[in-house]
Amino acid sequence: MSFFTLKTLAKCICVSKQWASLIRGEDFTKVYLSLSLERPRLMFMVTRFRTQPPEPEMSWFHNVCLEQRPEPGSLDVDMEALFHSVYQNEEPLLSSGQQQLRISYAPLTCSVTRPVRGLICLQLRNKFAICNPGAKTFRTLPEIEADPKTVIQSFLGYDKTTDVFKVLCITCQSGIFINLITTYQVCTIRFTAGEESWRPITCEYGHKPLTEGLFINGVLYYAAERYSDKSRVIMSFNVMSEEFSVIELSEQVRSDYGLHLVNYHGKIALSYFVNYKTGGLQMWVRNEMGEWLPKKNIKIPPWKETVEDITFSFRGTINGTNELVFTENALHGRKGLPYIVLFYDPEEKNLRRFDIENLEGRDHVKTFVDHVDSTWLM
């Protein structure tokens, strides 16, 4: 049963209470996840105009969006997010274990964390839910009290020691007659559903987040602006101890690069855009000693012949194969055409191209690497 797909397991749950209890048990979840880690996925989040009614399993999101629409009295939701995933180490990539999930949302209200052990955190303004995209299930979290002008950003992490997920939420409030007020809160999500709540925590480094989070080995990383000197830094948050620390950026790193954080072989890196003419990837990588290594340059010889005149962004490395993953940087003028994903093996100097055909009607696409199947929340 541990080799069944999530779709098959969902059917097995309906067979008997005994099967449902086994599949939803903590021991089975751990075994299933350990096997899934050997078959990671690429997951695409496609935003587009809604084409179908919302899925019954995700009706909570549809109802929340109706509450939060900018036009009072409207009875419809204009946009939807399609989560589409395939096995990233198997060919053909286009049809290997495809999964899809659709949720409706009101424009400018929806944000999604990078996946962590098969789960994502969906944020709709001040409302949150932990979601299992493969199983099409979710668990709602308490709302954050905030006025419409408050900026709210959330991050998802996992504490291996206590086997719990945690959501870090940072709210920034400012106005003409008040000083900047920033609050830091954490919500702990355990395997057994309980009364989750937000707990205030302290941070001695006043800052506001600038990017989404990157979770590696128990630590959340994100770029931020420090209030004390307005400098840009990388913040790290230890999910177990719930302590913050600051990673300084040298002047050269700040001037050379944007703030695009990626996982490069288990290390955090700041990557630059890929030159479509030369196929050159440039980045700064931080080592185990906390030092930024000299600028890394990777040349990809067959680039021009493979991708034509399209700009790409580096998304990180594939766990296990160490291949580099690139996806289209912009989609302007390419609607109706396949979405391109590139895998590059630096040792074999082999560049593979995959045209993803099933992302029709897209307005924007985000790509996540190393997503896995999980029976959490089933």
Image (spheres, rainbow, N blue to C red):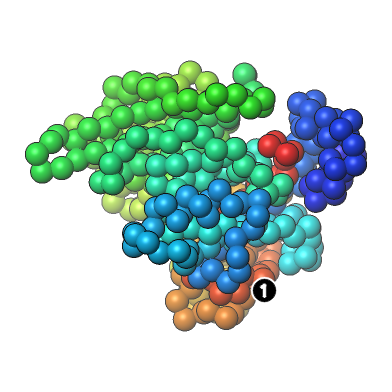
Residue drawn 60% across and 60% down? 54
The amino acid type of the residue labelled 1 equals Glu
Residue 199 against residue 320 in the figure, above or below: above
Residue 166 in picture, x, y percent from top left: 53, 29
Residue 340 lies left or right of residue 112; in this view the side is right
| In the image, farthest residue toward the left | 177
Residue drawn 75% across and 60% down? 98
Residue drawn 14% across and 34% down? 179
Residue 197 in picture, x, y percent from top left: 48, 25
Residue 281 against residue 40 in the figure, above or below: below
- Mark 1 burial class by Cα count in 10 Å: few <14, some 14-19, many 20+: few
Residue 220 in picture, x, y percent from top left: 48, 34
Q: In which quarter of the image is the N terminus?
A: top right
- The residue carrying mark 1 is 357
| Of 272 and 346, the residue lying toward us | 272
Residue 245 against residue 210 in the figure, above or below: above
Residue 176 lies left or right of residue 290; in this view the side is left
Residue 141 lies left or right of residue 53; in this view the side is left
Q: In which quarter of the image is the C terminus?
A: top right
Residue 263 in picture, x, y percent from top left: 54, 44
Q: In which quarter of the image is residue 315?
A: bottom right
Residue 32 against residue 244 in the figure, above or below: below
| Of 35 and 297, the residue lying toward us | 35
Q: Is residue 44 visible?
A: no
Q: Can residue 52 be seen in this view?
A: yes
| Of 110 and 86, the residue lying toward us | 110
| Of 147 and 72, the residue lying toward us | 72
| In the image, farthest residue toward the front | 73
